[in-house]
Image (cartoon, rainbow, N blue to C red):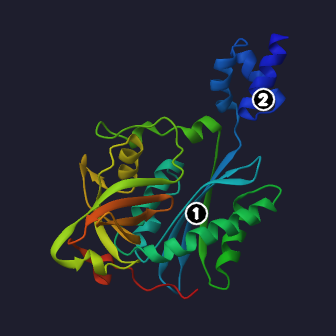
């Protein structure tokens, strides 16, 4: 009876199949707690697609990573970067998925990044991919290639995809080599939507906060002291040799509140910032040459 109860509980807790639950319990000597820890190694149903794109006529390069739950056909993680800087295409797709995603975040902050275009297209591309994946019985590199090409049609693109299959534990754990002694290591990879405390750099010759507009780019530093903030700062390139460094951020919204201005910033998909700015402050705003957006693609 105890074995049966544990079997049901394990299936309910993890969503695994009966055969997988039985195996995990046998390996764990019918210890439910150990079985829950073990099951993650058995659930190998996550596929990562690391994608590199070239738009030959537009001289634009792209990186896309899609993590798919093969049982539910749900997209678990989705990240993109588009740039006129050809060096991003030199990033190897043979690195682990976490490092590839980190490279995508870094590429969005480097010279040549088409950040505005990336922001505009990311949600649309994710939605398009999710709808298409739901209609496919078995998702493979060929299907993902067709989906991406269909999305950008009639624009011609060259595409390269590498597929990586993971179990649940591999997907949730961080690779140890991505952190050094100055970085906070988290045990579970589950960022979700995060708003970070931030500070915008001021400039006595800069633009008055009262005249700041949505879509402008400013320099900011992350002041948030949470563990997740330390990790994200490391991920998006806001820390170098253990020292917090300024990073560009796009103004999303500006509110006048309690005699100060509340400024909402955009760093990357699901990562935003919140800065409180005094009403008489002047901010350093980056012009087009400084952020080097390049041309916005015609589609």
Q: Is residue 88 above or below residue 285?
A: above
Which residue does the numbered mark 1 point to in the structure image?
51
- The C terminus - image quarter: bottom right
Q: Quadrant of residue 168?
A: top right
Q: Residue at x 71, y 69 (%)?
A: 147
Q: Secondary structure at mark 2?
A: helix
- The N terminus - image quarter: top right
Q: Residue at x 40, y 74 (%)?
A: 85
- For the residues labelled 1 and 2, the Cα–Cα distance comes to 34 Å
Which residue does the numbered mark 2 point to in the structure image?
11
Q: Secondary structure at mark 1?
A: strand
Query: In the image, is 294 to the left or to the right of 247?
Result: right
Q: Is residue 77 above or below residue 11?
A: below
Q: Residue at x 52, y 53 (%)?
A: 94
Depth check, mark 1 against mark 2: the one in front is 2
Q: Percent from the top left, x then y, of residue 199?
A: 28, 59
Q: Percent from the top left, x then y, of residue 228?
A: 42, 44
Q: Is residue 149 above or below residue 3?
A: below
Q: Percent from the top left, x then y, of residue 201?
A: 23, 65
Kindly identify which numbered label has been placed on residue 134.
none
Q: Quadrant of residue 38?
A: top right
Query: In the image, is 81 to the left or to the right of 15?
Result: left
Query: In the image, is 200 to the left or to the right of 155?
Result: left
In front of the other: 235 or 255: 255
Dot 2 crowding, Cα within 10 Å, few <14, some 14–19, many 20+: some
Dot 1 crowding, Cα within 10 Å, few <14, some 14–19, many 20+: many
Q: Percent from the top left, x then y, of residue 240?
A: 26, 52
């Amino acid at each position: 009876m105890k074995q049966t109860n544990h079997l049901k509980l394990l299936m309910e807790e993890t969503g695994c199949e009966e055969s997988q639950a039985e195996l995990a319990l046998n390996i764990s000597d019918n210890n439910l707690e150990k079985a829950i820890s073990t099951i993650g190694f058995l659930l190998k149903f996550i596929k990562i697609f690391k994608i590199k794109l070239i738009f030959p006529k537009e001289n634009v390069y792209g990186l896309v990573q899609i993590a798919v739950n093969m049982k539910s056909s749900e997209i678990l993680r989705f990240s993109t970067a588009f740039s006129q800087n050809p060096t991003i295409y030199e990033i190897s797709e043979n690195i682990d998925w976490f490092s590839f995603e980190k490279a995508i975040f870094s590429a969005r902050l480097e010279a040549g990044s088409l950040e505005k275009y990336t922001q505009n297209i990311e949600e649309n591309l994710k939605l398009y991919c999710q709808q298409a994946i739901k209609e496919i019985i078995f998702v493979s590199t060929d299907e993902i290639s067709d989906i991406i090409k269909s999305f950008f049609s009639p624009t011609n693109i060259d595409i390269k995809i590498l597929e990586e299959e993971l179990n649940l534990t591999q997907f949730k754990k961080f690779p140890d080599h991505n952190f050094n002694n100055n970085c906070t290591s988290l045990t579970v990879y589950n960022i979700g939507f995060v708003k970070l405390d931030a500070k915008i750099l001021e400039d006595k010759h800069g633009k008055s906060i009262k005249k700041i507009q949505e879509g402008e780019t400013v320099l900011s530093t992350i002041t948030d002291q949470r563990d997740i903030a330390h990790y994200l700062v490391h991920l998006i390139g806001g820390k170098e040799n253990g020292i917090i460094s300024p990073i560009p951020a796009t103004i999303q919204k500006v509110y006048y509140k309690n005699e100060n201005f509340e400024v909402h910033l955009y760093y990357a998909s699901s990562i935003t910032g919140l800065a409180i700015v005094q009403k008489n402050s002047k901010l350093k705003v980056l012009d087009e040459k400084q952020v080097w957006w390049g041309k916005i693609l015609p589609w």
